[in-house]
């Protein structure tokens, strides 16, 4: 199985946390939150900037694993596991507070449904790589 489509898709998706992570570092002045006209809150601003930094770091980790994606199974699963858990948080928000704007519903679907599919795709690429090279990939 060719790894190139997985690498390209992963790199393109990696742009999302990098770009939005940088924007979220603006805190409550992030255009999304600024448009919501939230009251100034040091707690909210601090948390938004923190999570923006974490999100940016996750995006950079995605870029780091792309070149050797067939050998980065553990990191790939950890990253997509974190994204999946974020999607569960969004689902809880939908259940408790209602639907967010449409793009965030799409993000939720990608996070909850897409994450397991991406992990499976990477597993298949890694297995194919292991068969082609005679290398074991299970302990990575």
Image (cartoon, rainbow, N blue to C red):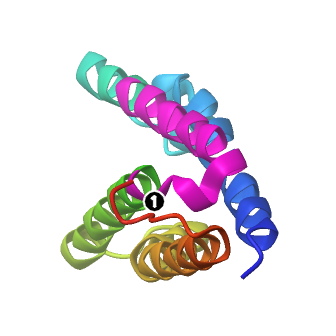
Residue 81, percent from left and from top: 34, 61
Residue wearing tag 1: 73
Residue 7, percent from left and from top: 73, 60
The answer to whether one can see residue 39 in this image is no
At 68% from the left and 38% from the top, the residue drawn is 19
Task: Please give the range of residues in magenta.
Answer: 50-74
Q: Is residue 42 left or right of residue 2?
A: left
Task: Please tell me whether residue 135 belongs to the stretch shown in magenta.
Answer: no
Front position in the image: 14 or 49: 14
Q: Is residue 52 above or below residue 111?
A: above
At 50% from the left and 45% from the top, the residue drawn is 36
Front position in the image: 43 or 58: 58
Q: Main secondary structure of the magenta part?
A: helix
| Res 20 quadrant in image | top right
Residue 62, percent from left and from top: 58, 45
Task: Please tell me whether residue 71 belongs to the stretch shown in magenta.
Answer: yes
| Res 5 quadrant in image | bottom right
Front position in the image: 24 or 60: 60
| Res 97 quadrant in image | bottom left
At 38% from the left and 33% from the top, the residue drawn is 51
């Amino acid at each position: 199985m060719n790894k190139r489509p997985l690498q390209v898709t992963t790199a393109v998706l990696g742009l999302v946390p990098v770009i939005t992570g940088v924007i979220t570092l603006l805190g409550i002045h992030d255009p999304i939150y600024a448009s919501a006209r939230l009251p100034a809150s040091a707690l909210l601003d601090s948390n938004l900037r923190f999570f923006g930094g974490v999100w940016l770091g996750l995006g950079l980790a995605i870029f780091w694993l792309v070149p050797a994606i067939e050998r980065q199974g553990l990191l790939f699963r950890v990253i997509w596991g974190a994204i999946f858990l974020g999607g569960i948080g969004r689902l809880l928000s939908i259940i408790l507070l209602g639907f967010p704007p449409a793009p965030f519903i799409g993000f939720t679907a990608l996070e909850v449904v897409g994450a397991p599919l991406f992990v499976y795709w990477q597993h298949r690429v890694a297995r194919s790589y292991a068969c082609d090279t005679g290398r074991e990939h299970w302990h990575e």
